[in-house]
Amino acid sequence: MSIEIDGIHKAFESNQVLRGFSVEARDGETLVILGQSGSGKSVTIKHVVGLLEPDQGEVRVDGERVAGRTLEELFALRRNVGYVFQFAALFDSMSVADNVAMGLRRMREVSDEEREERVREALRVVDLVGFEDRSPSELSGGQRKRAGIARAVATRPSYLLYDEPTTGLDPVTRAVVDRLINRMKDELGVTGIVITHDMESAFRVADRMAMLYEGICRLEGTPDDFRNSEDPVIRAFIEGRPELMENSS
Ligand SMILES: Nc1ncnc2c1ncn2[C@@H]1O[C@H](COP(=O)(O)OP(=O)(O)OP(=O)(O)O)[C@@H](O)[C@H]1O
Ligand SMILES: [Mg+2]
């Protein structure tokens, strides 16, 4: 069980974003992908659920290539790989419960009764019991993030992709979301990829880390490998000191 990102290249017209990026999320771990704004983190995880296809290289989930699947195969993949979008992407015209139930409605084997039970369970996990009938527009930023996580876990995926789960949240809510990410791993055995530039959060959730820089993996290793790295690019990033990076490549 793993997600393998294997040498992917991706350009949008003349903008070459990924230039052979490789990284692997192993069974039962949380992999954090770090990188500056615009480095291609969101582009990378969109390849994992087949929202984008690479120009070269491939992504494999459980050893099977993601690109080139039929629509039906993609739906099956997306049930198993929950995606917590960078901007929550909830539908304000639907209640919180209906948003969370969305992926389940596509699963013919899940009865109405079981769907309701799973929605209740997912909302309990993210501590949003009592918010079922609200519109997402009536939630705070942190509550919306948690509702996004509930929607992603409702189908009981083996994998969860979190795109900037803590960005824009206060320190307490960030810690709550980080704890939630750790519970998904510890209690549900989820293999996770977390994309972030929030270093505090990264060190709280990561089993391993990878830094995406200029389209490739600059460093992949344990949190200690990152703490101890002398690479100016890594140091600049984790210390928030861009001047360290000048004249290095
Ligand atoms: N669908 C698209 N069409 C054209 N260009 C795109 C598309 N999606 C992303 N890009 C470009 O690819 C680059 C990487 O974008 P991406 O969203 O992956 O950055 P990111 O690392 O997630 O940044 P942030 O931390 O700000 O979210 C950017 O230059 C962006 O403009
Ligand atoms: Mg992004």
Image (cartoon, rainbow, N blue to C red):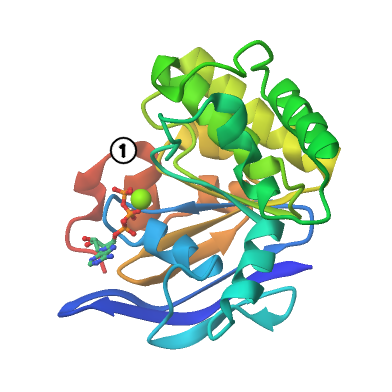
Q: Is residue 239 left or right of residue 220?
A: left
Nearest the eye: 81 or 117: 117
Number of numbered markers: 1
Nearest the eye: 28 or 83: 83
Q: Is residue 128 above or below residue 151?
A: above
Task: Give the residue displayed 72% in from the left and 31% down from the top.
Answer: 119
Q: Is residue 170 above or below residue 168?
A: above
State the image quarter where residue 16 is shown. bottom left
x%, y% of residue 129?
Answer: 69, 14
x%, y% of residue 17?
Answer: 28, 71
Q: Circle 1 — which element?
A: loop
Q: Is residue 92 above or below residue 74?
A: above
Please indicate, yes or no, whether residue 207 appears anywhere in the rendered image.
Answer: no
Task: Give the residue displayed 64% in from the left and 33% down from the top.
Answer: 150
Say what amino acid the circle numbered 1 marks: Gly
Q: Which residue is mark 1?
A: 240
Task: Give the residue displayed 37% in from the left and 86% down from the top.
Answer: 55
Q: Specify few, some or many for label 1: CA neighbours under 10 Å numbering under 14, 14-19, or 20 or more.
A: few
Please indicate, yes or no, whether residue 223 appears anywhere in the rendered image.
Answer: yes
- In this view, the residue farthest toward the bottom is 56
- In this view, the residue farthest toward the front is 112
